Image (cartoon, grey):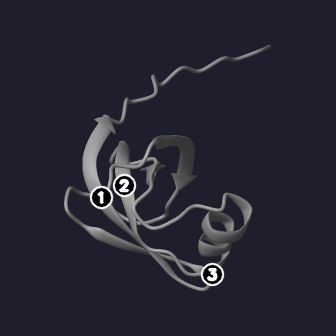
């Protein structure tokens, strides 16, 4: 299969992400990938979970009820948000 162009799609996934891992998407996210964005197997998207950073993932199975992503590489590390307090009196 030829290399597909990388899409600028970012998808929040509420699951741990690590290199080489397969992640199964729920019905709602699978619907978004299949029907809204019309992505095909083999295409690349970026996924993040707010804990581990952002990862480039390949769609290995695309179905409207359940899709599977394979995590390929980390594109961004998670940065800590500074603990800033603003008080008014």
Dot 3 or dot 2: first in sequence order is: 2
Point 45% across, 67% down: residue = 41
Question: Circle 3 sits on which residue?
Answer: 64
Position of the C terminus, as image quadrant, is top right
Q: Is residue 46 above or below residue 23?
A: above
Question: For mark 3, does the 10 Å Cα neighbourhood hold few (<14), some (14 to 19), or many (20 or more) residues?
Answer: some
Question: Circle 2 sits on which residue?
Answer: 57
Q: Is residue 6 above or below residue 80?
A: below
Name the one closer to the observer, 86 or 38: 38
Report whether 62 appears left or right of 32: left
Q: Is residue 3 above or below residue 17?
A: above
Question: For mark 2, does the 10 Å Cα neighbourhood hold few (<14), some (14 to 19), or many (20 or more) residues?
Answer: many
Q: Quadrant of residue 70?
A: bottom left
Dot 1 or dot 2: first in sequence order is: 2
Q: Quadrant of residue 84?
A: top right
Name the one closer to the observer, 30 or 81: 30
Where residue 23 appears, as percent x and y from the top left, is 37, 71
Alpha-carbon span between mark 3 and mark 2: 18 Å
Asked if the residue at tag 2 contacts the one at tag 1, i.e. Cβ–Cβ closer than 8 Å, the answer is yes
Question: Circle 1 sits on which residue?
Answer: 71
Point 44% across, 56% down: residue = 43
Q: Quadrant of residue 38?
A: bottom right
Where residue 73 appears, as percent x and y from the top left, is 24, 46
Position of the N terminus, as image quadrant, is bottom left
Residue furthest front as drawn? 2
């Amino acid at each position: 299969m030829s290399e597909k162009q990388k899409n600028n799609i970012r998808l929040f996934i509420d699951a741990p992400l690590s290199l080489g891992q397969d992640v199964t998407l729920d019905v709602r996210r699978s619907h978004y990938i299949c029907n809204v964005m019309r992505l095909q197997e083999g295409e690349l998207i970026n996924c993040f979970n707010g804990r581990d950073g952002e990862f480039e993932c390949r769609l290995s199975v695309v179905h409207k009820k359940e899709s599977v992503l394979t995590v390929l590489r980390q594109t961004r590390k998670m940065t800590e948000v500074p603990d800033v307090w603003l008080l008014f009196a």
